[in-house]
Image: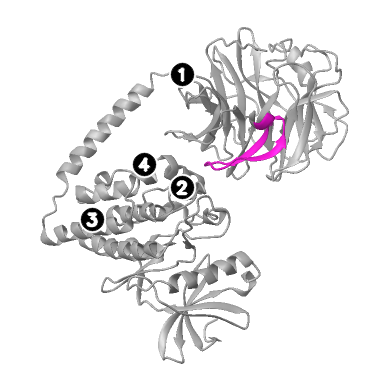
Amino acid sequence: MTDQTIGHYKILDKLGEGGMGVVYKAHDTHLDRFVAIKVLPAEKVTNPERKRRFVQEAKAASALNHPNIITIYDIGSDNGCDFIAMEFVNGKTLEEWLGQKGLRLGETLKVAVQIADALATAHAAGIIHRDLKPGNVMVTEVGLVKVLDFGLAKLMDMSEGREENTTRTMAMDAAPSTELGAIVGTVAYMSPEQAEGKTLDGRSDIFSFGSVLYEMATHRRAFQGETRMSTLSAILRGEPKPVSDASSSVPRELEKIINRCLRKDPARRFQHMGDLKVELEELKEDSDSGKLALGATAATNSSRRSLLGVILTAGALLAAMVIGIAWWLNRSPKRVSAPVLTRLTSDSGLTTHPALSPDGKLVAYASDRSGEGNLDLWVQQVAGGDAIRLTRHPADDREPAFSPDGSKLVFSSEREGGGIYAISSFGGEAKRIADGGHNPQFSPDGKRIVYWTGERYFATLGEVYVVASTGGAPTALQTGIASARYPIWTPDGQHLLFLGRQRPDIASTSDDSADWWVAAVSGSAAVRTGAFDVFRGSALDVSLPDIAPIAPGGWIDDQHYVVFGGRSGASQNLWRIPLSRTTWHVLGAPERVTFGSGLEAKVSATADGRIAFVSLNEMMTCGFSQ
């Protein structure tokens, strides 16, 4: 658009681009001054939500009159181009300052005080920024700060639970940007409550401010993962590396301020940005006068924390395994190489039904670890760390499974008479998808969910259903056989592999019609794989009561093998078997994958060969009461 004119503004140069529009340097021909013009691209004007936020930015920011907040001059539309004309700041973003040379302590405090003052004014006017990050802070050569982009700000509503106060979008790049989608904000700097889609107040900005302040003090991000999901996980349950470990020159008083800003619980943070500004002003005065003590005490505290971490880690290794994960290196279709096993949980109660995220970085499971007498869903990083509790319902929630992009979980629950529910991978309100059902699984494209109905623990008839992942009327899978249970999607997303039987009157897997079957989702006669004939010719026992069926667990090894739990002798281990993806027939003998002495079951697998499973080391009984 260079050299074009919008209204009475002549476009000179492009300054930058973000989720809410493109910014240009322009000349105001009426008042003969430079301005910054933010233009919403014409092709995006058709999105009413994007346009609403664009206009909202101008209105929110124009209501704020403060030397550290960008001044809005005009808002208009010209030949289909919606634009905002604002103050032109001759400087660099804080992100650029940090990337080029970093900031000294005095500069850090000078910038921090100005940001805090700007946000305190906004909060007093009832406006939350919601997207504070280094890229939204301009710093001039003389150190004047201007806070930009109140485009995600919303007037604080004093009524609790208003849907418009919840967050909506998230994005994560090397240089964080903001995009429209499900949660508003930039992942690396958002608060835990923002990441969970909860109602926000000014304390959310305080957390984001703490993340920015941490980065200014240490020259590294407080929360940074390899993916958007791992970054969100770190924000929700992780703690950043202690400031004093990252930089020995940071005074302990500043470290305490940063730590208080980054409390997970909003009630334990600073409650008002004005109070935080006062703390920073006093710290700046002490810094300017040379009264601040650096280094030694912080380093000592850091050493104590490190020693405590070693002690706690050593103690954790004494616990017994409940959920494990295994994967194979240098895999070959001709042999099973030695698995690498990693214990993931060590609860004393029941922890079961693990589910791996598609990238293998997260594991979700059902557990009674809360001590409240029921199963809830929990999620944690495979690499280690505390678990996040996702559900808090007195009924049992179990059998979670991740969506293909890892952003959602589907699970079965006993709440409200039993049903299939979906929930964000990082918590929030669960949505009922279907009535009744067990073992739900997302399709490879994430658009459908499969589950089965019938008695969970005994060999009665079962039926498989498919429903849209957003909910709606479920469709029964037409198989042509009497019973179908434990379905999993085939890699093509067009078929389902399941445990089935032709005869409805046999209540045991010793039935010679019991087998793994494949049927098209669109409806077709089921194809028998021949798996059970192969099992009967191996060491696997297929004459067990149906409370522990040999059901397919998941596809591994580039999706050419199916992994499952099967009993041989006194132990139950994980096995794999090759299966043709054209004829759906078994291509070879089953191969044992694990060799534990307990009961290894409840398999979840990723295509690259990572498997999560439960290892039960004690006999369990169940009873029923009238």
Q: From the viewer's perspective, is 219 left or right of 80?
A: left
The answer to whether the residue labelled 1 contacts the one labelled 3, judged by CB atoms less than 8 Å apart, is no
Which residue position holds label 2? Answer: 193
Seen at 63% across and 67% down, the residue is 48
Mark sitting earlier along the chain (2/4):
2
Q: Is residue 39 above or below residue 313?
A: below
Magenta region: which residues?
416-439
Residue 95 included in the magenta stretch of the image: no
Amino acid type for the residue under numbered disc 4: Glu
- SS type, badge 4: loop
Label 2 environment density (alpha carbons within 10 Å; few <14, some 14–19, many ≥20) = many
- SS type, badge 1: loop
Which residue position holds label 4? Answer: 239
Q: From the viewer's perspective, is 82 left or right of 233?
A: right
- In the image, residue 518 lies at what x, y percent? 80, 30
Which residue position holds label 1? Answer: 348
> Would you say residue 147 is visible in this rendering?
yes
Q: Is residue 383 above or below residue 152?
A: above
CA separation, marks 4 and 1? 25 Å
Colouring style: one colour
Amino acid type for the residue under numbered disc 3: Glu
The answer to whether the residue labelled 4 contacts the one labelled 3, judged by CB atoms less than 8 Å apart, is no
Seen at 47% across and 50% down, the residue is 194
- In the image, residue 187 lies at what x, y percent? 47, 52
Nearer-the-camera pick, 96 or 547: 547
The answer to whether the residue labelled 2 contacts the one labelled 1, judged by CB atoms less than 8 Å apart, is no
